[in-house]
Amino acid sequence: MSRRTSRHYLTVCFIIAVCILQLGFIVPLGAQPERCHDAITPNDMFSDLTCAFSGACLLAGGFAAILWGFLRSLSLHLQICWQVVPGQKIFWGSLLAGWGLPILFGSVALARTGVSYRFGDTCHINHEKALQDYWGPLLAFAAVSTILQFATLGYCIRVYIRALFKDDGRSQSSSRLPSHNGSVKTVTAKQAYRRVQKAVAVQWRGIVVVIIIIVNVVFLAVVFVSMDNTEQAVMENFGKAEPWLSCLVLSGGDKNMCLDKVKGLTTSEPTVMAVLILMSLNGIWTLLFLGRASMIPAWFDLIRKRFARKHDFVSVDARRHSGNARPYEMITSPPQSAYTPKAPEAVVTSPPIDGETIVVLSPQTREAKYVSPTMSFSTPRPPSSGRSHGREWDPVNTYARPWSPNANDKGGII
């Protein structure tokens, strides 16, 4: 399954974060919430449950998408530029930071700032304390992720240029032993280029989709910060809103007649629509770049194995010795007429030989009596009394030449 889908925890968590972000736009489409609390006040998370759910998904999903994009950029940068393979510590640290920080900053933003229907059917974060509680950390991680992406890209270009213009044929053809500078960690330009090329060939889909998500979320943040700054400027200087307020009074509260007076007081409608369209397309971009055709048969096989009927194993011996294999395999099943077990007969272990004892195994007794054969020489014998303090050696019995310390020859042999 993993080989056919090429799954990785960084990719899976990034896709889950994008799905949570898209829930902020999908849920209001089905719920069709009432955006207005009264004639001039929109609903917020305290007056509408759909607003609270969609706003929480939008805040947590957007922050998680940026953070997992940052973790993916960091992992790729370490592998390509520093040749560091992430281990178990980075794995658990990424899971803790990738889901813990979005929950933390999303909860703080909901508690201190809140969400409401500012435009569209999705609740967005309010203006008060939004920059320091949510947009500031989000833009910081997006900026660091962008720097890592461009640093990795610059390193790849540098390695490519070195491999293109540097002639390292002499170093490859040299038969001398490597010195301290030419150790195992030192690689040539072409070797580094091949390594970088393999890594980029595997990771280019993730690099592109991460850049797209970062650009979309940053664009959303810039638009919202611009809206907040414009509204704050109007609140501090009511003279800018005087033409619009006068038009509302003269038209009896008909806002459609005064739309031309709103220019300069809020963000333009095309810009807001562009933000919503780009954010809603994040799921499609993720599917196009991270989806693979091999995932469809892999999921089909996985579901089919879960619901497929598992057949009991029946051995070949059971089918050969019995017409019905079920009593053979199922020990607790009573024997049927088609198969009756045969009582075991006496087993002779060896042919009868003079002086030997035949060993017989009876089905009633589980013990066998064994008598040593008469021609066996392996029976242990008790030690003699003269061998208590050492071994005795008789040269006559061993046919060895006698030896004397007083012999004339040098070796002492008589």
Image (cartoon, helix red, strand yellow):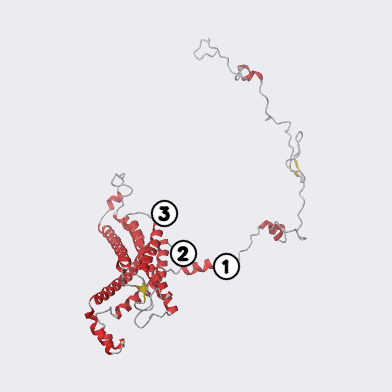
- The residues bearing labels 2 and 1 have C-alpha atoms spaced at a distance of 21 Å
Where does the C terminus fall, quadrant-wise?
top right
Q: Residues within 10 Å of mark 2 (few under 14, many from 20)?
A: some
Which quadrant of the structure image shows residue 75? bottom left
Mark 1 against mark 3, which lies toward the viewer? 3
> Comparing marks 2 and 1, which lies closer to the viewer?
1
Residue 113 locus on image (x, y percent): 34, 69
Measure how far apart labels 1 and 3 are at the Cα level: 34 Å
Whether residue 188 is visible to the viewer of this picture, yes or no, is yes
> Which of 57/236 is in front?
236
In the picture of the structure, the residue carrying the numbered disc 3 is: 88
Picture disc at residue 307 = 1
Residue located 28% across and 80% down the image: 268
The residue lying furthest to the bottom in this view is: 251
> Circle 1 — which element?
helix
* Amino acid marked by disc 1: Phe
Q: Give the structural element (helix, strand or loop) at label 2.
A: helix
Inspect the image, locate mark 3, and give the three-letter code of the amino acid beneath it.
Gln
Calculate the distance from the C-alpha at mark 2 to the C-alpha at mark 3: 24 Å
Q: Which residue is mark 2?
A: 4
**Quarter-of-image position of residue 337:** bottom right
Amino acid type, residue under disc 2 in the picture:
Arg
Q: Position of residue 126 (x, y in %)?
A: 33, 72
**Element on which disc 3 rests:** helix
Q: Earlier in the sequence, mark 1 or mark 3?
A: 3
